[in-house]
Amino acid sequence: IFEYNGSAIVAMVGKNCFAIASDRRLGVQLQTIATDFQRIYKIHDKLFIGLAGLATDAQTLYQKLVFRHKLYQLREERDMKPQTFASLVSALLYEKRFGPFFCQPVIAGLGDEDKPFICTMDSIGAKELAKDFVVAGTASESLYGACEAMFKPDMEAEELFETISQALLSSVDRDCLSGWGGHVYVVTATEVTERILKGRMD
Amino acid sequence: MSKAAVDVPMKGGFSFDLCRRNEMLSKKGVQPPSFLKTGTTIVGLIFQDGVILGADTRATEGPIVADKNCEKIHYMAPNIYCCGAGTAADTEAVTDMVSSQLQLHRYHTGRESRVVTALTLLKSHLFSYQGYVQAALVLGGVDVTGPHLHTIYPHGSTDTLPFATMGSGSLAAMAVFESKYHEGLTRDGGVRLVTEAICSGIFNDLGSGSNVDVCVITKGQTEYLRNHQLPNPRTYINEKGYAFSKKTEVLLTKITPLKEMVEVIEGDAMEE
């Protein structure tokens, strides 16, 4: 069921910044029906979540999360920390343990003192924190390989953008179900840079 | 639906509302998603002053290693730790839940938690889900009655043992324990034996790998030795790294400067 729509999401940590990238294809098995599908959503200025897997579950889950986050903002009068948000997503997914959402989230954010935080989960909420990179989606196996080779610790924003884009584009080229360009967000303490990449249109 | 506003589930527990849809999807031939498993080697043993727990650090998703350095020794109470094998989400959720129940119990009674309390809470939860919550646990701790070590199986049965292993690498680790365990081990001897058992699981079992985590629990003191041994360092690191001569083609760039958060210091507090 993860291979119904196709997706590829990767997040990487740099020096006081992080980058999260996804492909842009939406398909129904082998037929492409959209080439500008958004998989990465903004929760607040310094917290992004990318949702891989079944597109309908991704959108529903995103709406539930935005709802919970807005309630949190009203009660606490501040934004959620990424670690707290990850626990929230994990709890929401585990609640549906025996009838899960077919969705794999990738969470990336800047925590206290702008320390980057990334994590991914499987479809029932098993958190997997990493210090370097996390991947999700149909292209995840190629992404693991590409990121493992191309990643260096403590990269600056420009170099991080270049690395994550190259890793994403080379991995989706090896996967039929994802591709048609890329969508990259690079977040530092002072700005959010959103870029759309040109890739192979097949 | 008029109930839509009350979507926030305060009651806790599992919600089954997507089950019918998922069953319909699987009848149409769509496979359910695979979960993150911790095909694992986890061990525990009792030595003269307390309990030592050990675990490897690999988390697998099918044949792929999803996490090379995950934590499998979970905190339950200051004097009780629990290693988990099976489905990663289940072990994490079940140990977190029982850990908070133990904390509440500590506040209620004002006493240090006992290992049998954690044991009963875990086994009754697992039994009530008849093995569907796939968590196989090694629970160890030191309380007023002394050191205890228990294993808990996914269906809810438990064993109380002087040394125990669980997970896919349990046979490899048990072989080491059966040949070298004896009563009255010292702390260093115990840590060495546990490390040897985990290493035998790491090298001989495909579902276990990466590093060794050890946790030593004695009366009044707990030491969590995260990544106690790293027998698999990364070889063949390319010093230069990758230099991308051909830059990626960017179609569109949008830069949003982040505004400074405005701190509201003055003002009335909200009335509850």
Image (cartoon, coloured by chain):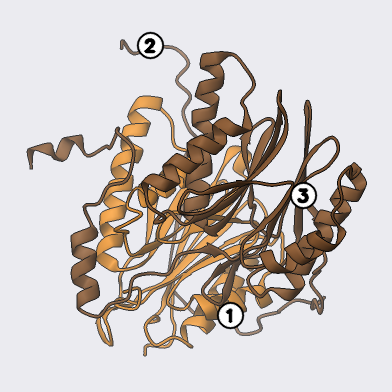
Residue B41, image x, y percentages: 67, 62
* Residue depicted at x 46% and y 28%: B262
Instruction: From the rendered image, report the letter of the chain displayed in brown.
Output: B
Q: Quadrant of the C terminus of chain B?
A: top left
Relative vertical location of residue A104 with respect to residue B11 in this rendering, above or below: below
Tell me the subunit letter for badge 2.
Answer: B
Instruction: Name which of mark 1 and mark 2 comes first in the sequence.
Output: 1
- Out of B222 and B44, give the one closest to the viewer: B44
Q: Which residue is mark 1?
A: B247
The answer to whether residue B268 is above or below residue B57 is above
Question: Would you call the spot at circle 1 few (<14 residues within 10 Å), some (14-19), or many (20 or more)?
Answer: few
Amino acid under disc 1: Lys
- The CA span between labels 3 and 2 is 48 Å
Pointer 3: what residue?
A: B214
| Corner quadrant of residue B111 | top right
Residue B258 makes an appearance in the image: no
The residue lying at 30 percent from left, 33 percent from top is: B10
**In which quadrant will I find the N terminus of chain B?**
top left
Q: Which residue is tagged 2?
A: B269
